[in-house]
Image (cartoon, helix red, strand yellow):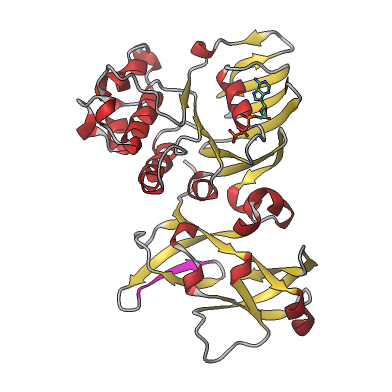
Amino acid sequence: MLELAVTRRQGTFQVQVELNTGTGVTALFGPSGSGKTSVINMVAGLSRPDCGRIVVDDKVLFDSTIGIDVAPEHRRLGYVFQDGRLFPHLSVRSNLNFGLNRLSASERRVDFDAVIEVLGIGHLLDRRPALLSGGEKQRVAIGRALLASPRILLMDEPLAALDSNRKAEVLPFIGALSKRFAIPILYVSHSMDEVLSLADTLVLMDQGRAAAAGPTEEVLSRLELRALTGRWEAGSVIRAVVQGHDTETGMTRLSFAGGTLAMARNHLPPGASVRLRIHASDIAIALDRPGRVSVRNILPARVRSVSAAEGHMVDVVLDCGGTDLWAQISGCAQADLALQPGMEVHAMIKALTIARGDVAEKGDAA
Ligand SMILES: Nc1ncnc2c1ncn2[C@@H]1O[C@H](COP(=O)(O)OP(=O)(O)OP(=O)(O)O)[C@@H](O)[C@H]1O
């Protein structure tokens, strides 16, 4: 859907990125100043690569070798900024119709009613933007961008100006878009929680380059990328399915390829496909299955690898029924256990360490 190979020098900063992404949500994640907005601006046509090529949905938007540089207004892209930038003098309905009215009937690929329904903004149509909450404004801004039937939706930190409650309100709507409408999303974010709940593909930006790109679970679980994914975020990201909730014990049960996990009760529907983050420092390892112990999750596993990490820590990758779980233990624990590849062990995860923010409903990409 998006093919990009661009180079651009801006001041002393060099952006040099190659990307090839498919449908669904692609997140550009990285520290401030790593070049995320620079990439999105080149796709939008707001800044010009020194050389390279940008193709969206088979349409060449930029190609320095054959002199193609389509003007931003002719690229048919949707752009959602941090602040919704709605027209203050127009109602929500007129804001939404703005992009739609500029398309011929044959160019309209997105249905008004469907957008209203997915974004939950039907009751706001006659209001002016000044009377909307921050989250509502962003949903309208997303709707307006979508209704212009873009080839791709570019979202540059669309939730950054919202508080955490508003963020949580808007996130599921964005997640639903990529499933409902066959429009890929390029999503810039600083926030690992957003990446976890939205991104099908993750691109880690570092100093103007794409340091890694691939399926989100895979990129987040790579040990060598922890400097970029964040030391405290480090851990495995696995797929699981909500089995059910137990009101008496206040627990939710999840199943994954390696067994069943219990966590503090959440509100996801049984049967929901979720993405679950298990922090490396939350996994303890036992050589023998412990008997009476408070830890709720005890999973048989086989040691896949053991390697030294910074600060006298040791990284241990466990194969848990075909799912890799990354554990981090202290050097003195390793001195005691002498873990080696191939050893049969038990991975222990306290139910309460799997926080609600670590579980995000995430079906497969559309
Ligand atoms: N027009 C410009 N001229 C010179 N330097 C620029 C220009 N635009 C951006 N830069 C520099 O390019 C680098 C990348 O900026 P960019 O905005 O792409 O980063 P980012 O990853 O989106 O950061 P943030 O998360 O803070 O928004 C920064 O060092 C920035 O100062």
Residue at x 24%, y 21% (from the top left corner): 91
Rendered view: 75 above or below 208: above
Q: Residue furthest bottom?
A: 291
Ligand 1 shows up in the quarter that is: top right
Magenta stretch containing residue 255, yes or no? yes
Residue at x 62%, y 17% (from the top left corner): 47
**Helix, strand or loop for the magenta stretch, by majority:** strand
Q: Is residue 256 visible?
A: yes
Magenta stretch containing residue 306, yes or no? no
Quadrant of the image occupied by residue 51: top right
List x then y, in percent, for residue 65: 74, 12
Residue at x 47%, y 28% (from the top left corner): 81
Q: Residue furthest top?
A: 67
Residue range (magenta): 250-256
Residue at x 58%, y 17% (from the top left corner): 45
Q: Relative to the observer, which residue lies in front, 1 or 246?
A: 246
Q: Is residue 261 visible?
A: no
92 vs 26, left or right, is left
316 vs 165, left or right, is right
Split into 4 quadrants, where in the image is the N terminus? top right
List x then y, in percent, for residue 78: 46, 24
Rendered view: 136 above or below 109: below
Q: Relative to the observer, which residue lies in front, 130 or 337?
A: 130
Q: Relative to the observer, which residue lies in front, 8 or 83?
A: 83
List x then y, in percent, for residue 98: 33, 16
List x then y, in percent, for residue 349: 55, 74
Rendered view: 229 above or below 35: below
